Amino acid sequence: MQELKLPRRLSWEKLCQILVSYLNAGADREYISVKDVAEKAGVDEKNISRNNAFFKSWGFLEESKDTPKKYKLAEDAIRFVAAYRIDPNSDAARRTLQNLLMKNEVVKTIVEKIDAEGFDRRRLMAEIPLIVGDAKVDLVGIQSFLDMLSYAFEWEVVEAKKQKPVEQVREAKKTRKEATEKVLPAAKTGVNLQLQLVFTINHDTDVEKLLLLFDKIAYILGLSRGDEDES
């Protein structure tokens, strides 16, 4: 069985953009290079290359045996990407992705877990790497994987009901931004900082402490969905 990999550094929407670019470049008919896809997707070649392991392990891509590092869309992936290209919000796109993913036993395990326990994104952020078996991942990659599952199985509909009204979220972010600018006036200088956080998770990891760490990071970056915004 092929080792499963989680996404690296890119959002689910950006991963879909790459898959559509594979289709547009003719990967439904022949094996093509990463360079060909990068030109169409407007994504750095390195970001595509590091995510091809994810695409391969979950059945989206097949690598050429004769010409390594050339890829072709798998049959199930062609159906999904074609439907997604027409309408990302269509039932056809979600259904075809669901069919592709449900061929994997790990996805079946995750689906059963969420059906039984509910879609708790905060806890799943810590548990997914252990379930998948890919311990060294970044936060964006885990979020991207959960977004993929949420999209396919429409869990985001349930999740959205738990979210605060958009106006509340915007107001909370505005307040936080104003407070940060008072404390850190240097932030107004326009410095653009890119931060990558990579964690190694194993079965000895204290999940509760990890969740608290995720919460703190999300709060600092203004991504928190937690109770701190309700005050």
Image (cartoon, rainbow, N blue to C red):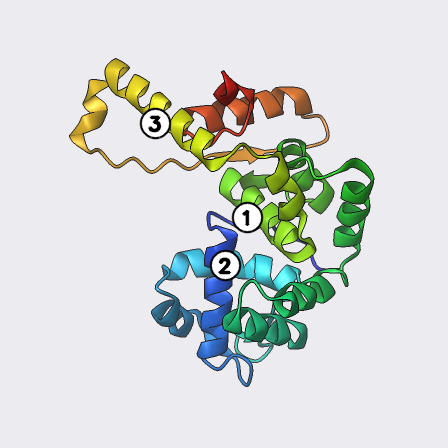
Q: Residues within 10 Å of mark 2 (few under 14, many from 20)?
A: many
Identity of the residue drawn at 61% across and 64% down: 56
Cα–Cα span, label 1 and label 2:
8 Å
CB atoms of marks 1 and 2 within 8 Å: yes
Q: Nearer the viewer, residue 79 or 31?
A: 79
SS class, disc 2: helix
Q: Which residue is mark 3?
A: 174
Q: Residues within 10 Å of mark 1 (few under 14, many from 20)?
A: many
Q: Which residue is mark 1?
A: 144
x and y, in percent, of residue 204 in the image = 71, 26
| Mark 2 or 3, nearer chain start | 2
Q: Nearer the viewer, mark 1 or mark 3?
A: 3
x and y, in percent, of residue 149 in the image = 65, 52
Q: Is residue 10 left or right of residue 226?
A: left
Q: Amino acid at mark 1?
A: Ser
Q: Which residue is mark 2?
A: 15
Q: Nearer the viewer, residue 8 or 85?
A: 85
- The answer, for residue 50, to whether it is visible in the render is no
